[in-house]
Amino acid sequence: MGRNRPNIIITGTPGVGKTSHCELLVQATSLNHLSINKIVIERACHHGWDNEFKSWMVDEDKLLDSIEDEVKAGGYIIDWHACDLFPKSWIDLVVVLRTESTQLYDRLKARDYPEQKLQENIDSEIMEVLLKEARDSYDAGIVVELQSNDSEDMESNVERIEEWVKSWKLNNAPDAA
């Protein structure tokens, strides 16, 4: 049975505004925000804490098992810095947020990221690692790259995604076939 609400991944390097976008999208679309960072902690989908990078070491198999039934039902905005682990059949749109590297540096510095973690994330953004990951993992027609440098970008992005959700619902309604 098909879903009557889409699933969207909002991905990008830490600091690009994924969670801020998701919070606005929840208000605009009535979809549910699925913060993978919170799921990892609340449902213990990890192998422990990495002191060097100040982050949880995610157990991807346990994570996927933990969210499978929810996501398969539809209606989720998945908020995480990676996207390639989510099965294609679960996902209808992948939004890769991008930010200018100087702005990203300032945002990550303000979060007190360790220097090595900060530099790896800046390098990842410059080298378009997450954009390439999305393009390699999903059909080209569902991967969208959007800029996220300021509040105007965010507002425009939310409006664009909201319109996409409306269109998806029209095209995928039970009587649309």
Image (cartoon, rainbow, N blue to C red):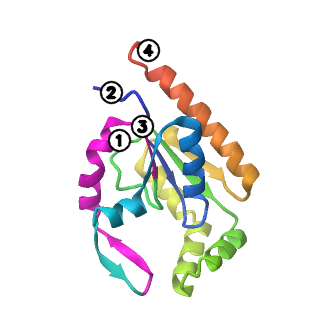
Pointer 1 or 4: first along the chain: 1
Q: Which residue is mark 3?
A: 75
| Side of 43 where 176 appears, left or right | right
The residue segment tinted magenta is: 52-78
Kind of residue sitting beneath label 4: Ala
- Please identify the quadrant where the C terminus is shown: top left
Q: Which residue is at the front of the view, 79 or 24?
A: 24
**What kind of element bears circle 1?**
helix
Looking at the rendered structure, which numbered label has been put on residue 42? none
| Side of 25 where 75 appears, left or right | left
Q: State the residue at coordinates (36%, 59%).
A: 39
Where does residue 23 sit, x and y in percent of width and height?
A: 56, 50
Q: State the residue at coordinates (28%, 65%).
A: 45
Q: State the residue at coordinates (43%, 23%).
A: 172
Q: Which residue is mark 4?
A: 176
Q: Which residue is mark 2?
A: 2
Q: State the residue at coordinates (27%, 47%).
A: 68
Q: Which residue is mark 1?
A: 90
**What kind of element bears circle 3?**
loop
Disc 4 to disc 3, C-alpha distance: 18 Å
